[in-house]
């Protein structure tokens, strides 16, 4: 009986961890999965209620049912952990999923950046890259924030040109879209774009632009200082549950 009680306590703790989730993230469960967890939690609680002294429920069939539920809950927890790890790895490395023949799936052209973000009336195009030890949007302005690379690292500055194609004044609003960006390339390049105070940080763009006007914005990550150039770059964008990978060069 002690072994059975221990199993129930462990399973209940596992259910509790699932309901709490990882950090502030709330796990997304289907209605069936939520019902499964609720049923199991209720059974465990009822089984440990001191006021419940009936032995009718303490049968081999009931024990087997609870063990089956515990196994299903454990499998569900493992599935959620695996999905979270895969999503985190994909976002950090910028690596797209590949088909059996090695062809990358979901690779889009840079011209589709505006459509994915939801910048109606704007065009976003790739405008080159730069590798440097430090970066400021305007080196002639002493009040402009400057971003410096850490020791042993260089900054990879990806430049994006945003053009107002709408024919009238409009706001290029990336900030409110709650976007996440990562940059991937050859020579082991792969990392999340920094959160900066730069006035031309693309992730925080929210600027009014006249018809036909264009401005240059940047996304920056760090790379090993031994890397001085790259022949391929791609940008991984994530918005809510949606993601897209665009080929820059």
Image (cartoon, helix red, strand yellow):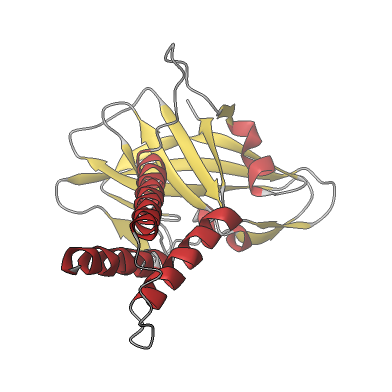
- Examine the rendering and report whether any part of residue 72 can be seen: yes
Placement of the N terminus among the 4 image quadrants: bottom left
Depth order, front residue of 188/196: 188
Q: Position of residue 172 (x, y in %)?
A: 68, 55
The residue shown at (46%, 62%) is 37
Q: Is residue 29 above or below residue 212?
A: below
Q: Is residue 246 above or below residue 77?
A: above
State the residue lying farthest toward the top.
101
The residue shown at (54%, 34%) is 126
Q: Position of residue 214 (x, y in %)?
A: 66, 46
Left or right of residue 192, residue 121 in this image: right
The residue shown at (35%, 73%) is 55
- Examine the rendering and report whether any part of residue 144 can be seen: no
Depth order, front residue of 57/27: 57
Left or right of residue 136, residue 175 in this image: right
Left or right of residue 5, residue 210 in this image: right
State the residue lying farthest toward the bottom.
51
Q: Is residue 156 above or below residue 141?
A: above
Depth order, front residue of 4/236: 4
Residue 123 quadrant? top right
Total residue callouts: 0
The residue shown at (37%, 59%) is 66
State the residue lying farthest toward the left.
152
Q: Position of residue 101 (x, y in %)?
A: 44, 11
């Amino acid at each position: 009986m002690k072994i059975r009680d221990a199993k129930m306590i462990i399973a209940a703790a596992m259910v509790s961890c699932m309901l709490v989730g990882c950090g502030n993230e709330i796990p997304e469960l289907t209605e069936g999965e939520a019902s499964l967890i609720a049923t199991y939690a209720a059974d465990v609680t009822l089984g440990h209620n001191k006021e419940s002294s009936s032995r009718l429920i303490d049968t081999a069939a009931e024990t087997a049912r609870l063990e089956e539920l515990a196994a299903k809950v454990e499998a569900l927890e493992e599935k959620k952990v695996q999905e979270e790890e895969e999503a985190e790895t994909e976002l950090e490395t910028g690596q797209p999923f590949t088909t059996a023949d090695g062809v990358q799936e979901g690779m889009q052209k840079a011209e589709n950046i505006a459509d994915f973000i939801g910048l109606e009336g704007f065009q976003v195009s790739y405008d080159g890259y730069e590798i440097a030890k430090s970066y400021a949007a305007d080196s002639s302005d002493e009040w402009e924030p400057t971003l410096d690379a850490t020791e042993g690292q260089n900054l990879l500055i990806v430049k994006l040109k945003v053009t107002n194609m709408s024919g009238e004044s409009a706001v290029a609003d990336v900030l409110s879209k709650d976007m996440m960006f990562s940059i991937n390339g050859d020579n082991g390049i792969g990392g999340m774009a920094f959160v900066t105070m730069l006035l031309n940080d693309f992730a925080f763009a929210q600027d009014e632009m006249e018809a036909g006007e264009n401005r240059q914005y940047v996304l920056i990550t760090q790379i090993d200082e031994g890397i001085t150039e790259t022949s391929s770059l791609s940008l991984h964008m994530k918005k809510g549950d949606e993601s897209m990978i665009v080929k820059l060069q």
